[in-house]
Amino acid sequence: MHDTIIMLGHGFHGGLFGHGKVVINSTHVDILKNKKLVGIWCFANFFFERHGLLGIYSDMIISEMDEAMAFGVDCTYDEINQSNLQFALAVRDSIQEDSPIETFKQMYRSNENPVIRWNQDNFYYAYETYQLEELENNEQHIMDYNAMEEQWEMDNYNEITNEQQ
């Protein structure tokens, strides 16, 4: 079994997309628990924090021009490419460190690149998690809510995908 799992791509607060569908969602939480994780997709922080997952994860990040335009970040394609390269190197060099988020944040910083400037504070590291007793007592309600929320998100994703085709 693997100790570190890396999940990168496009996603939403309910999970990670791949091949036109959701490939990581709440049904995978038991596999992901107690692993060192890297979860880099838009709004992965909601997924990690809801499920008490550990590792490096992101909030909304910009990796392509459409995202930059949607969030009002004035940049060039070269700046996006520079950001993506610097990001990949920072992830590579930080995931095996004792303090991975500090290493990552030292490597992925810029005062000049508007994409890196926008992204750089949208990464987090959880090294321990707490389970609230109240949540344990309402586990079925939480599972029902998560299932309903993920179905709603998937319906929205399918609707957007169909409109784009």
Image (cartoon, grey):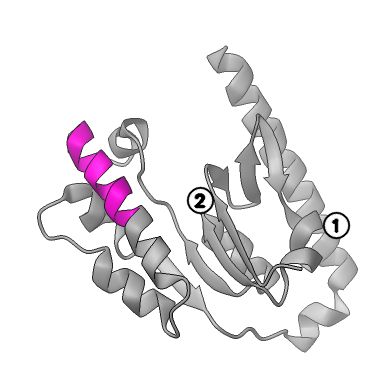
The residue wearing badge 2 is 41
| Residue 128 x %, y % | 60, 86
Residue 155 left/right relative to 93: right
Closer to the N terminus: mark 1 or mark 2? 2
Residue positioned 58% across, 24% down in the render: 160
| Residue 112 x %, y % | 10, 54
Magenta-drawn segment: 77-87
| Residue 102 x %, y % | 34, 79
| Residue 26 x %, y % | 76, 57
Residue positioned 89% across, 67% down in the render: 140
Residue 32 appearing in the image: yes
Residue 73 appearing in the image: no
Amino acid of disc 1: Asp
Reply yes or no: does residue 25 show up in magenta: no
* 94 over 20 or under it: above or below: below
The residue wearing badge 1 is 144
Residue 127 left/right relative to 25: left
Measured Cα–Cα span from mark 1 to mark 2: 24 Å
Mark in the foreground, 1 or 2 = 2
